[in-house]
Amino acid sequence: MRILLGVSGGLDSSYSAEILKAEGYTVEGAVLKMHGFTDIDGARKASEKAGIKLHIIDCSAVFEEKVVSYFINEYSSGRTPNPCTVCNRSVKIEELIKYAESNGFDLVATGHYARTGEEKGRYFIADGADTKKNQSYMLWKLTQEQIKKLVFPLGDRIKEDVRNKAGKLGIESAGKSESQDICFLPNGGYAQFVKSRLGAFPEGDFIDVNGKILGRHKGIINYTVGQRKGLGIALGERMFVSNIDSENNTVTLKNACANGFVSAELTDMNYQLMEKKDGRYEVDVKIRYTAVPVPSVLTISGEKSRLDFNAPVKAVTPGQSAVMYRDGRILCGGVINKAFEN
């Protein structure tokens, strides 16, 4: 069986190639050229080391359209985007599958630390075995047809074990540290990137929850909901950004000791194990990649979806993803549109 493996030149894809070969697959690699920081040479060296053929897929145009434009639009609107969730569905997995289907491959593999499953005809992403590295959250947007085609060789493995075994095989990337930055902004600086595309953002008012002016902000692009540090204003108490209003150019600050949010409105829902059906469902929800799942109730009514947390939750941020789980399996997910304190 032929399998096309997404290759980055890093540890995870390099070791995935070894696993797949050992399992009897005929493996070929593919590196997705998405932007100027794509490590084509690293992918080529890793493929040569693994003894597999490498295909280069230029998807820079679709990456600009689907990911970069989304990223800029969300930040400039006062929301905090999840570019990896969009990229995984609309670029990485989508482009790999399209290429695989056009070139006679049976399946597609990537080095994600997650698992796939099927139950009663529904395909879903599930948590990986490594709780510290688990990447299921970033894959909530994947469709039924995409999941059906996917293999995750590292889903049942622990990252440190992978690193140790890769080192013994002489895989060069085994000793390298991993970047936590956004791939097309390896040096950080999202605000400067957005300003380089759209120009400067005007100053405006910091306000409190009652609309009282507290001071001046330096442009909404420099702030995100939940931010506590670097606000540039001294008010004699710890404050955080609770809302960004791009239309009125205001940033709302609130006392950092506030109780938190009790519910959220969701948009752009995607269903995996769970089929779309009106009703109330008990779920465990993650509102950030590193967050601990919290018990909640998801209410679906037509095109409207609402989360009610069993206990108040901090930093529920518009633009971020809310991913609903049961027993470590993704039921569905959505984008946080609004958060409510009561």
Image (cartoon, rainbow, N blue to C red):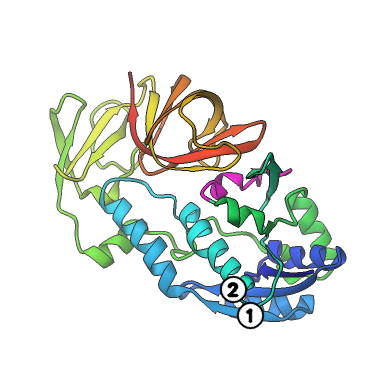
Seen in the picture, residue 126 relative to 150 is either above or below; the reply is: above
Check residue 240 in the rendering and tell me which mark sits there, or answer none. Answer: none
Residue 303: image location, x then y, percent: 37, 36
Residue 322: image location, x then y, percent: 47, 37
15 on left or right of 242: right
- The residue located at (59%, 80%) in the rendering is 56
Q: Amino acid at mark 2?
A: Tyr
> SS of the residue at dot 2?
helix
Residue 24: image location, x then y, percent: 86, 67
Q: Which residue is mark 2?
A: 99
- The residue located at (83%, 68%) in the rendering is 21
Residue 216: image location, x then y, percent: 15, 42
Q: Amino acid at mark 1?
A: His
Q: What is the chief secondary structure element of the magenta stretch? A: loop
335 on left or right of 191: right
- The residue located at (19%, 55%) in the rendering is 201
Q: Which residues are magenta?
A: 127-141
- Residue 269 vs residue 159, the one in the foreground: 269
Magenta stretch holds residue 129: yes
Mark 1 Cα-neighbour bin, 10 Å: few <14, some 14–19, many ≥20? some
- Residue 36 vs residue 138, the one in the foreground: 138
Magenta stretch holds residue 21: no
Location of residue 250 by image quarter: top left
- The residue located at (61%, 75%) in the rendering is 102
Q: Which residue is mark 1?
A: 55
129 on left or right of 61: right
